[in-house]
């Protein structure tokens, strides 16, 4: 038995913030942001919208496209690092809102690799036979944790949610391999220092702080490693890839890696120009758009490869149903 994807969905907030909008309040320019990152605009959740509000819409769309009802779910896993509350989890909020009465629910915290981590957990649960239908969501509203005066970080991130529904299948399709990695020694390179149990009163900053150059170096190294290692685990190679969906952080990171691997641009899905880095939502949001755009067909080999705070990385190789 393998876990196969039978439904996808996504949701972004309506409000668009362009590079030119940012240039009105910080010393930057559309040209600088586009050439260094590829990002043109991002979506920003308003004050009344939290991560679960985006996640629920993505989840409902994924369930609809899977033609399943919430009652069919036996597990909900959400990858997020911007939950509505420290507890209950976003997954439990979804379980309640969806009325998925039979589903257990928990969050996975692996920042921008959160969707890869959550998908890996879900596929293991299905392969070992304990669960049949699992909703996996990647959702974040990191713009709420940005210092809008810090031009090294505020230009990069946006908000969103993406979801897939997995089911147990023996038709040969599904998740062929998973690969995960953590380098906790580099944790302080991308960190939200305030607000956790070390600093519950947020004496330190509640904003994302980042060493952009160090994270860039890590990303380039592990994105390549994750693609190779996940393919190796599936007995496949780079030439077998029909579509790579990398974490949508920066097109320079993506272009550097695919050039080195000899993967043509046509085989790589990129939508970061519209959304920026939406953290755990980035891969399922791109996956949903790639499916809608007709870029993924039955039997295709799709690789999802992410990296993020932790520092973490992960990749999943899928044979599309
Ligand atoms: N607009 C204009 N200038 C900016 C700027 C901005 N938004 N941000 C930084 N600069 C300036 C710097 O102050 C610096 O000026 P100086 O040379 O006078 O000191 C110059 O541009 C170069 O800055 P640097 O930090 O070296 O730029 P960079 O090429 O490393 O690009 C990032 C910065 C953040 C775009 C890049 O490091 C990056 O993308 N890193 C990875 C981040 C990431 O993906 N994080 C999430 C991972 S999940």
Image: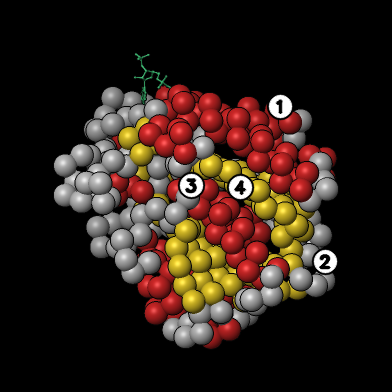
Residue displayed at 42% across by 24% down: 32
Q: Quadrant of the C terminus?
A: bottom right
What secondary structure is found at the residue carrying circle 4? strand
Label at residue 54: none
Question: In 3D space, how far apart are the residues under numbered discs 4 and 2 (Cα atoms)?
Answer: 23 Å
Mark 2, secondary structure of its residue: loop
Contact, mark 1 vs mark 2 (Cβ under 8 Å): no
Q: CA distance from mark 3 to mark 4?
A: 13 Å
- Which tag is nearer the camera, tag 4 or tag 2? 4
The percent coordinates of residue 314 (x first, y second) are: 60, 46
Specify whether 110 is left or right of 15. right
Q: What secondary structure is found at the residue carrying circle 3?
A: helix
- The residue beneath circle 4 is 180
Taking the spot 20% from the left edge, 51% from the top edge, the residue there is 200
Provide the residue designation for mark 3: 112
Marks 2 and 3, how far apart in space? Answer: 29 Å
Query: Which quarter of the rendering shows the N terminus?
Result: bottom right
Which residue is drawn at the image coordinates 28% and 57% (left, top)? 46
**Residue 30 visible somewhere in the drawing:** no
> Label 2: which residue?
172
- Decide which of tag 2 and tag 3 comes sooner along the chain: 3
């Amino acid at each position: 038995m393998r876990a196969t994807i039978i439904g996808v969905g996504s949701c972004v907030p309506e409000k668009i913030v362009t590079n030119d909008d940012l240039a009105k309040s910080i010393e930057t320019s559309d040209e600088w942001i586009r050439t260094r990152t590829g990002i043109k605009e991002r979506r920003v959740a308003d004050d009344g919208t939290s991560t679960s509000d985006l996640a629920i819409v993505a989840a409902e769309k994924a369930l609809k496209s899977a033609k399943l009802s919430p009652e069919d779910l036996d597990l909900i896993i959400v990858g997020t690092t911007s939950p509505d509350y420290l507890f209950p989890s976003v997954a439990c909020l979804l379980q309640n809102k969806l009325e998925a009465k039979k589903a257990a629910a928990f969050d996975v915290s692996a920042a921008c690799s959160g969707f890869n981590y959550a998908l890996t957990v879900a596929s293991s649960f299905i392969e070992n036979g304990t669960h049949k239908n699992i909703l996996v969501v990647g959702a974040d509203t990191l713009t709420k944790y940005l210092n809008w005066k810090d031009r090294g970080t505020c230009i990069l991130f946006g908000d969103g949610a993406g979801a897939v529904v997995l089911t147990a299948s023996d038709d040969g399709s599904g998740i062929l391999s998973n690969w995960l990695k953590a380098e906790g020694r580099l944790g302080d390179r991308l960190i939200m220092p305030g607000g956790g149990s070390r600093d519950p009163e947020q004496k330190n900053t509640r904003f994302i702080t980042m060493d952009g150059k160090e994270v860039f170096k890590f990303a380039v190294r592990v994105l390549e490693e994750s693609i190779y290692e996940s393919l190796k685990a599936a007995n496949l190679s780079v030439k077998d890839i029909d579509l790579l969906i990398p974490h949508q952080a920066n097109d320079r990171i993506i272009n550097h890696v695919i050039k080195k691997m000899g993967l043509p641009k046509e085989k790589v899905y990129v939508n970061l120009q519209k959304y920026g880095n939406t953290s755990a939502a980035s891969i399922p949001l791109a996956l949903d758009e790639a499916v809608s755009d007709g870029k993924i067909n039955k039997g295709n080999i799709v690789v999802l490869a992410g990296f993020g705070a932790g520092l973490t990385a992960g990749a999943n190789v899928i044979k599309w149903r």
